[in-house]
Image: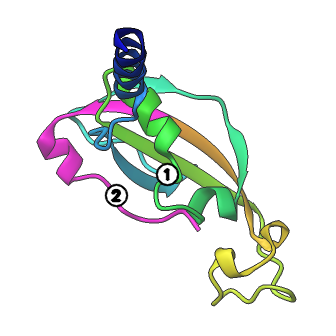
Amino acid sequence: MRRGLFAATLLLAIACATAPSKRIGVAVFEAPLDGSPMPEGCRLLLSHPPVDMNELQMTGSKDPFHAERERAAAAGGNVLLVRSMLIVPRQDYNCPAASPITNCPPSEGYWARVVFEDYACSDAAKAALPSTKPR
């Protein structure tokens, strides 16, 4: 009996230790890939190599950049800047622009070149950040 209780307690402890945090504390801002520099008060921690992402990856979930926000937090950042540039537009014949990508075949969405940048920004600098979506 004690052995079973110990095993259950150990499993619960492991589950709690590995459970993801609900609040990461990293704000996400989006801007064009060739956009302006960050405001004074933001210090670049890391700039990651460009990746190509499709529309479903970028907009299809509630928190599409969760892993990138965790990575920025681990580096000491509080801002994730998602810079992107359209490289292949949406194919309108099967998925009209007015339709959300979640209602379309995943292959029909746009493709973008994306660079993730991790920053440590003051509160004043965060308030001055662009909220423009790079579409």
**Circle 2 SS class:** loop
Drawn side of residue 40 relative to residue 118, left or right: left
| 60 vs 76: above or below | below
| 113 vs 61: above or below | above
**Circle 1 SS class:** loop
**What is the magenta range?**
117-135
Q: Residue furthest left?
A: 124
Coordinates of residue 11 in the picture (x, y in percent):
43, 21
- In front: label 1 or label 2: 2
| 80 vs 73: above or below | below
Q: Few, some or many C-alpha atoms within 10 Å of disc 2 (few <14, some 14-19, many ≥20)?
A: some
- The answer to which quarter of the image holds residue 76 is top left
For residue 39: magenta? no
What label does residue 35 carry, if any?
A: 1
| Whole-number angstrom distance, CA of label 1 to CA of label 2 | 10 Å
Q: Residue furthest front?
A: 1
Instruction: Report the residue marked by disc 2.
Output: 130
For residue 119: magenta? yes
Coordinates of residue 128 in the picture (x, y in percent):
22, 53
Of the pair 67 and 76, the residue shown nearer to us? 67
Q: Residue at x 19, y 43 (%)?
A: 125
